[in-house]
């Protein structure tokens, strides 16, 4: 998905009123559809209050340019609106407000230039057209369309103004950008959450209404809901929000699902370092049931973005529940990661079968976080998408107009190894359809299929000797990826890393998806996944195989 706005050649069209050394007002001209706001990446956020008919209708923070423009973000104009702008930078470094660059560069336009100018923008991964993205939110499938909402800042490429962006896809590979779904309000900004399809109209908003649950991040974090009667395009916020409150400081990311056996709705909430379970007959009235987490798994950070699902254990008749628990920090290689717990859940209590001291990770790379699954996926599938970044450096990765991509979609399941149950992760079957022709060398977007008969090292390299080394040790049953010399690793000390995964038995085949700035190595049998970002100065165009492996490379259909 491409996206870029240019206004460099355009002349100023705004008349602002300067009212103080840090305060200005600007009447918005709604004859054009957008006002392009010039952003300076290292500037403090200016606070903009949008006033209409004397009422405050919206607020946003934007790093309005004072000296130079790094990129533009579009503000969709509304009739009769007034911007009340307070700058927060020190006037010692910004200079006089009268001479700020933003006044000269703000421009009205009717259409957005969607040509991509970003070197690292992936081709077959979802990215926002512009602006910052983190967690996937509210994902659901309906009538052939996969809906993906996401934590989004429409007004800049850093975390701010949390909202739900929206994209749709019919094949999980090509994504269309949709209008913004949810923007903050008096209760706070819109943090992560989930959607369900209320097939039986339990909430009273109508049969098959899409109901979204999200955290209102105000002075306290509370849970809110909104509903959509147009299939997820637009949402109406429930008039009696918030629906759940708590004195807990970290209280967020509601995952809601219909519990078939229990005959009611369940919600899982991440609360500090535990997960809390709630039940409801009607999506509006929620009862706290129990909590899980104390003494179990990793507690190196805050627990976030839960998911909970029942799955079959491959090769058996058993069904078990898996509780997904994203955690930040505390990941196996620092920062954010996805842990999970296996057990039973009766709608009220989760009983974990894992040893309390054990931590099970879903992906052993550094860039796999906030993993959640689609609601209502066809054929009983559990299709997950993760945010391909890490809070350690997500705001600093070398892109400009947008920041962050999501992982490829993955099919989750369960498998047994040495008497233990683990989560299996396979590339979603839609990735098979995305395969193009066989090519002789790697390109910036391709799939490499490595078939192993023993120890092997795969080295991906470009002309500048920037390289990624992937090593499979058949005896130790480990798979490593070394990105310490992969290209630009300078933007954060936590970026250069070697990640290592257990393979739970021998590896037969690993599918390696390369898309400009990401490498996802996923065991074709599902026992190992590793997701890492890379920023090479030129694409890796050479692959060297040392040891017992064969490589086949496929292009990806665009
Ligand atoms: C996880 C997270 C969530 C929160 C959201 C805010 O990455 O911290 O817990 O809802 O991001 O953007």
Image: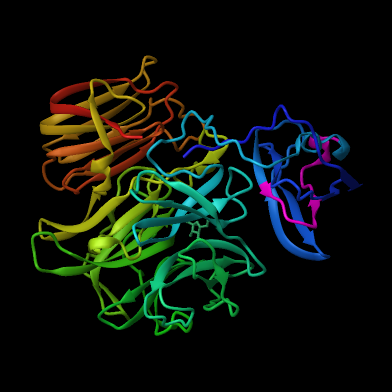
Magenta run includes residue 343? no
Say whether residue 230 is left or right of residue 12: left
Residue 131 in sight from this viewpoint: yes
In this view, 369 is above or below 194: above
Residue 503 x/y as whole percent: 18, 44
What residue is shown at x 53% (from left), y 34% (from top)? 399
Total number of numbered labels? Answer: 0
What residue is shown at x 79% (from left), y 62% (from top)? 52
Give the magenta-colored segment's residue range.
75-95
Q: Quadrant of the C terminus?
A: top left
Extreme-top residue of the structure:
463
Say whether residue 353 is left or right of residue 257: left
Residue 272 x/y as whole percent: 46, 66
The colour scheme used here is: rainbow
Say whether residue 350 is left or right of residue 63: left
Quarter of the figure with residue 455? top left
Quarter of the figure with residue 117? top right
Magenta run includes residue 76? yes
The answer to which of 444 and 388 lies nearer the viewer is: 444
The answer to which of 342 and 123 lies nearer the viewer is: 123
In this view, 381 is above or below 444: below
Residue 152 x/y as whole percent: 54, 52
The answer to which of 297 and 197 lies nearer the viewer is: 197
Residue 300 in sight from this viewpoint: no
In this view, 111 is above or below 198: above
Residue 269 x/y as whole percent: 43, 70
Quarter of the figure with residue 539? top left
């Amino acid at each position: 998905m491409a996206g870029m706005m240019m206004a460099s050649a355009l002349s100023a069209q705004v008349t602002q009123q300067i009212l103080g050394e840090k305060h200005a007002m600007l009447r918005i001209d709604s004859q054009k559809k957008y006002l392009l706001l010039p952003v300076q990446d290292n500037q403090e956020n200016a606070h903009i209050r949008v006033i209409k008919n004397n009422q405050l209708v919206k607020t946003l923070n934007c790093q309005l340019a004072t000296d130079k423009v790094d990129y533009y973000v579009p503000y969709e104009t509304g009739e009769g609106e007034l911007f009340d702008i307070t700058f927060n930078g020190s006037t010692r470094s910004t200079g006089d407000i009268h001479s700020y660059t933003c006044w000269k560069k703000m421009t009205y336009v009717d259409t957005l230039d969607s040509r991509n100018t970003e070197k690292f923008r992936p081709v077959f991964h979802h990215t926002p057209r512009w602006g910052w993205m983190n967690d996937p939110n509210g994902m659901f499938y309906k009538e052939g369309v996969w809906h993906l909402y996401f934590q989004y800042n429409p007004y800049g490429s850093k975390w701010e103004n949390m909202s739900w962006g929206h994209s749709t896809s019919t094949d999980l590979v090509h994504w269309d950008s949709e209008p913004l779904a949810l923007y903050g309000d008096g209760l706070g900004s819109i943090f992560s959450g989930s959607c369900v399809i209320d097939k039986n109209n339990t909430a009273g908003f109508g049969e098959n209404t899409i109901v979204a649950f999200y955290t209102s991040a105000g002075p306290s974090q509370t849970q809110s809901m909104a509903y959509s009667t147009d299939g997820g395009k637009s949402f109406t916020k429930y008039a009696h929000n918030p629906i759940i409150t708590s004195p807990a400081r970290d209280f967020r990311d509601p995952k809601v699902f219909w519990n078939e056996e229990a005959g009611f709705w369940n919600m899982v909430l991440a609360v500090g370092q535990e997960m809390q379970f709630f039940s409801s007959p009607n999506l509006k009235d929620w009862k706290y049931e129990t909590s899980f987490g104390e003494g179990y798994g990793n507690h190196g950070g805050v627990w976030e973005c839960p998911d909970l699902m029942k799955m079959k254990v491959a090769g058996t008749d058993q069904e078990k529940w898996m509780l997904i628990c994203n955690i930040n920090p505390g990941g196996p290689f620092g920062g954010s990661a996805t842990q999970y717990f296996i057990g039973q859940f009766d709608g009220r209590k989760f009983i974990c079968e894992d040893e309390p001291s054990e931590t099970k990770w879903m992906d052993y790379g550094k860039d796999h976080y906030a993993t959640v699954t689609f609601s209502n996926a066809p054929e009983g599938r559990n299709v997950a998408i993760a945010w391909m970044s890490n809070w350690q450096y997500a705001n600093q990765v070398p892109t400009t107009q947008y920041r962050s991509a999501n992982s490829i979609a993955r099919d989750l399941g369960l498998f047994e190894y040495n008497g233990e149950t683990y989560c299996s992760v396979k590339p979603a079957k839609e990735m098979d359809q995305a395969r193009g022709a066989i090519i002789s060398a790697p390109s910036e977007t391709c799939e490499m299929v490595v078939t192993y008969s023993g120890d092997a090292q795969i080295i991906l390299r470009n002309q500048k000797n920037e390289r990624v080394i992937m090593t499979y040790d058949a005896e130790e049953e480990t798979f490593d990826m070394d990105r310490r010399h992969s290209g630009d690793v300078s933007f954060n000390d936590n970026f250069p890393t070697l990640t290592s995964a257990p393979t739970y038995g021998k590896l037969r085949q690993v599918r390696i998806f390369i898309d400009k700035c990401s490498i996802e190595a996923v065991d074709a049998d599902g026992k190992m996944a590793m997701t890492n970002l890379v920023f090479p100065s030129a694409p890796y165009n050479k692959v060297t195989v040392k040891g017992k492996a064969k490589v086949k490379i496929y292009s990806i259909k665009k």
